Amino acid sequence: MTDQPATRHPLLDDLAHVSAADGFGYLRGFLARLRQHPDPVRIVQLRRLGPTLAFSRRDELHDGFDEASRRARALGFAPAVRLVGGTFAPLHEGSLVLDEYGTGAATILSPDELFTAHTRLVASVLRQAGADAALGPVAHEYCPGIHSVNARGAVKLAGTAARQSAGAWVVSSVIQVGRAAPLREVTATVADALDYDVDPDTVGSLSDELDRDIDPVVIADALVDAYRAEEGRVPLFLRML
């Protein structure tokens, strides 16, 4: 998939450059750039990273962080620290990162409404793909939160986190499309190093739910279509896969 923005905007090139150079660390600087932009703006970015263990700031401050990072590397997952999220999230080539950015003036929704609308859109696309997807956490899931998307109430398919910064905001989801077995292995060993109560069997994916390999590009296209169909909330798009 290539960049196909609904409307070209200089911030798209800025975002493409910084996010390609640094998978998660760019976020603070980009939110500052958004705050300085004089006009309302809303951007949706879809991307994939290589095998990555995305730690939170809470994880980074944990006594077990160095050991958790070492274990992630040993399994081929590059440690990274992201600005959003309560605890770690595992990613690989079958994971979609969906980031929605904007300024406060770009939406009439409250932060909670924005968070919920974003997650409902993700769940709707996964249901359309064939999964029994619903909002809500699964007991002992990684990066637990009320805005998780689960399948059958048993496994986590996607997690969502948000950050606001003086009028600029980001809502970010990690959507597991490819097979989850490698994610379960790294989740188990990292959770053990951090002494978190996480059951690796709750790590799910769309491919596992449908028992066939799903191309993440297909789900990325469906997400873009869903955003474009939103009445009165047409975002700018940056599509990077």
Image: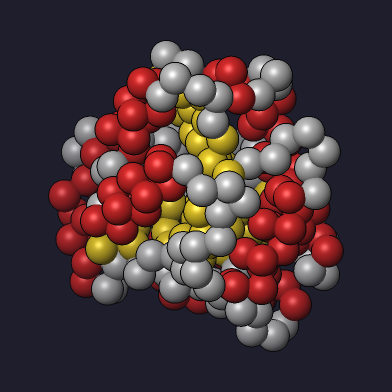
Give the residue drawn at x 59%, y 73%: 217
Residue 99 lies, with reference to residue 163, above or below; the image says: below
* Residue found farthest to the top: 166
Residue 104: x and y, percent? Answer: 55, 19
Q: Nearer the viewer, residue 49 or 104?
A: 104
* Residue found farthest to the bottom: 212
Horizontal side of 8 relative to 202 (left or right) equals left
Q: Nearer the viewer, residue 117 or 196?
A: 117
Residue 229: x and y, percent? Answer: 80, 49
Horizontal side of 44 relative to 112 (left or right) equals left
Residue 79: x and y, percent? Answer: 25, 56
Q: Nearer the viewer, residue 90 or 153?
A: 90
The mark total stands at 0
* Corner quadrant of residue 73: bottom left
From this viewpoint, is residue 139 visible? no
* Corner quadrant of residue 51: bottom left
Residue 161 lies, with reference to residue 71, above or below; the image says: above
Horizontal side of 171 relative to 224 (left or right) equals left
From this viewpoint, is residue 111 visible? yes
Residue 7: x and y, percent? Answer: 58, 47
Give the residue drawn at x 82%, y 70%: 130
Q: Nearer the viewer, residue 238 or 191?
A: 238
Horizontal side of 236 relative to 227 (left or right) equals left
Give the residue drawn at x 63%, y 41%: 235
* Corner quadrant of residue 93: bottom left
How are the residues colored? secondary structure
